[in-house]
Image: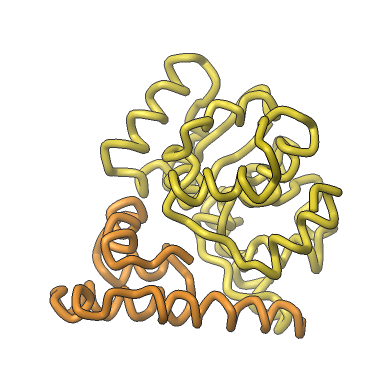
Amino acid sequence: MCVVDACFVIDWSRWRRRDLLWEVFSTGFVPEPVLREVSTPAPLRVLREWMAAGRLTVYPSSRELEDEAVSLVLEMRRDPRVPRIDPPEALCVVVARRIGAAVLSENRGILRAFQLAGERLAPAVVWNSLRLLAYLYSRGLAAASSFADLLEEYTSDARRAFSQREVAAVAREFGVG
Amino acid sequence: MEEWRAVDEELRELRRRSADWGYIESLPPRVREAVELYIETGDIWLAAKLAGMTVSEFNEVRIRAGILW
């Protein structure tokens, strides 16, 4: 299962092979406040398609969930090593902690919080599109002549590029360099 | 931590260099400040809120401003 953040969905929905997401995850949730951040036609159309196919559904919000998300933001701010985490990403983590899912987000704060203090977010894990693309390529789920070519295709469609340092690190980690 | 600082600086510099500053200067003040915040931090949610937009609306501005990182 995955919990998708707005910044992930907005970029990923532009990729021509976006449905490969469902080769990795059986089902996905988008928290209600995150859904409100998606308001332009193209990503809304993709969300509608995924919802109609029974892949994605909305995770209802509540005062309790949102309070827990704000507590997580404040907790992470006390750790000077963790960059700022915004409330929507924190909400995704709170939901993912409850249901044991992966958070998909491009927010650097939440990615680094996971790398630094994953035990505080467990059982949630946090991935961005770069890691997901590396996973898809390493498992043979996203065919391409090279990982670099796959990234070029994604960048061209999503209009979102990656740090070359991070690409090198992730490629080493997944053995796709 | 040092590696992360290097990544942040790499991305900040790429955002600055790729940005279409003529387009950014033409934006209304609130949106212009938001784009500049995005260039400095890469934080799209915060920038969208400063612009008074949703994240997906602000993302369209980001793309029109030529910022890929």
Determine the residue positioned at 69% across, 75% down. A82
- The quadrant in which residue A169 appears is bottom right
Instruction: Tell which of A77 and A81 is nearer to you.
Output: A81
**Residue A93 visible to the viewer:** no
Residue B29 visible within the image:
yes
Residue depicted at 65% across the width and 50% down the height:
A148
Residue appearing at x 70%, y 65% in the figure: A166
Residue B38 pos. (x, y %): 40, 74
Of residues A165 and A12, the one nearer the viewer is A165
What residue sits 40% from the left and 29% below the top?
A: A46
Where does the N terminus of chain A fall, quadrant-wise?
Answer: top right
Q: Is residue A88 or residue A144 the one in the foreground?
A: A144
The colour scheme of the drawn protein is by chain
- Residue A3 higher or lower than A116, as above or below: above
Most distant residue in the top direction: A53
Q: Position of residue A71 (x, y in %)?
A: 61, 65
Q: Quadrant of residue A163?
A: bottom right
Drawn side of residue A131 relative to residue B58, left or right: right
Nearest to the observer: residue A62 or residue A41 = A41
Is residue A88 depicted above or below A41 in this figure?
A: below
Chain identifier matching the yellow colour in the rendered picture: A
Q: Is residue A136 above or below residue B48?
A: above
Tally the numbered discs.
0
Residue A93 x %, y %: 64, 51
Q: Is residue A97 left or right of residue A43?
A: right
| Residue A14: % across, % down | 42, 40
Q: Left or right: A53 with respect to A168? A: left
Horizontal side of residue B11 vs A170, given as left or right: left
The colour assigned to chain B within the rendered structure: orange
Q: Is residue B1 above or below residue A44?
A: below
Q: For the view shown, which residue lies furthest in the front direction?
A: A145
